[in-house]
Image (cartoon, grey):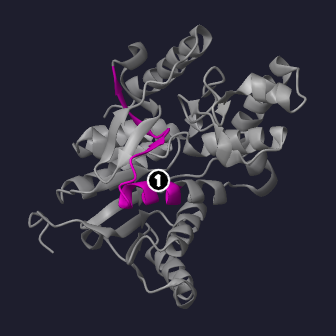
Amino acid sequence: MDVNSNAADIDIRKVAVIGCGFVGAATAFALMQSRLFSEMVLLDANHDKAEGEAMDIAHGVPFSGQMKIYAGDYDDIIDAGIIVITAGANQKPGETRIDLVHKNVGIFKSIIPEIAKRDYKGILLIVSNPVDILTYTAVKLSGLPENRVIGSGTVLDTARFKYLLGEHLSVDSRSVHAFIIGEHGDSEIAVWSSANVSGIPIDDFCEMRGHFDHARAMKEIAESVKNSAYEIIQKKQATYYGIAMSVKRICEVIVRDEKSILPISTMIHGEYGIDDIALSMPAILGKDGAETHVPISLNKLETEKLLKSAETLKDIAKGLEL
C-alpha cells in the first residue's frame, strides 16, 4: 500500500490493537466478544506473538459471531475506525505509572510517526501507562486533531470508585454517579462534592443506609481506588481485565455515537486554569472523538488538587523533548 495514498476511508467496524501483552490481548478478547467490530488487526513488535493471539482469539468466533481477526502491520490498520495502543513496558511491583515515562515515550516515538505518515483519519485510543503523558505525547507526535487522540484516562478508576461505593452502600454500582478526575495515577482526585446515587447526594444516601462516619469512609474508599492497581500488581504481577472492559466501553461509545460522558484523558486548554496538558475530565464522546468537556462542579479543595495534579503532569511533560 502506498503510504501517501491515504485518503483511506475509515471503517468504523474495524479496530486495531497495537501491543499484544497482557493488556492488549485481554482488550482484543473483550473487543471480540463485544460484537462491535467485523474486523480486528493485532500488531506487536513480536509478530509471532500477535499471530498467536489472533489465532487463539479467532477460535472463539463461532461462539460470538462472524469477525475477521488477524496479525498485520501498519499498512493493514490505516483504515481502522479506532486504533487502540497498549504497547509499552509493564508497571512492575513497587513502580509508579510515572516511573514508566521515558521507556514508553521512547516506544511511542517509534509507533506514532508510523501512523501519522499514513495520514490516519480515525481515532487514536491510548491505553499504555502513564496514560496522560502518553496521550499528550501522541497528540504532539501525530499532528492529529486533538479530539481524535484520547486516553483511557480515569475510566477504570471511576469504575473502581463506583464499584466500591456500590459495595459500601449495598446498591447497584450503575446507580452511583461519581468521577475520578486528574491524573490516572497517584495525584488523581475523587470528586465527592458532586457524587450522588440516583440524584441523592452521597452523604444523604450513606445516612439512609446507616453510614455516618463520612470522613473516614471517604478517605478509605478514595485510597482503595488509588491503590487497587498496585495491590493487583503485587498479587498477580499485572492488571488487564478491568482496563480491557474500560476500553470496550470507550469503543462502544465511539462506534455507536452514544454521546456518553466518560472521564477520558484529553488535552486541556484553559478549563480550571489548566493549559496544554492531557488529563482526565468528564467529556462527551462520540463517533468523532471527544466533543466537549463537561464542567462538573468542584469544591475549593478538589480544584486545588486538580491544579496540583496538572502541575505534576506538566513537570514531567517539560522533560520529554517531543
Q: State left or right for residue 130 relative to residue 187.
A: left
Q: How many marks?
A: 1
Callout 1 environment at 10 Å: few (<14), some (14 to 19), or many (20+)? many
Q: Is residue 92 visible?
A: no
Q: Is residue 249 magenta?
A: yes
Instruction: Provide the residue span drawn in magenta.
Output: 247-269
Q: Is residue 153 visible?
A: yes
Label 1 amino acid? Ile
Residue 78, given in percent of the width and then of the height, sits at 25, 66
Residue 97, given in percent of the width and then of the height, sits at 59, 38
Q: Residue at x 75, y 38 (%)?
A: 165
Residue 118, given in percent of the width and then of the height, sits at 18, 60
Answer above or below: position of 18 versus 187. below
Answer above or below: position of 190 versus 59. above
User: Which residue lies under the disc numbered 1?
Assistant: 250
Q: Residue at x 66, y 43 (%)?
A: 175
Of 113 and 25, the residue lying toward us:
25
Question: Which corner quadrant of the image does residue 220 belong to?
Answer: top right
Q: State left or right for residue 165 relative to residue 71.
A: right
Q: Is residue 263 magenta?
A: yes
Identify the element where label 1 is drawn. helix
The quarter of the rendered structure image containing the C terminus is top left
Of 109 and 9, the residue lying toward us:
9
Q: State left or right for residue 300 relative to residue 111.
A: right
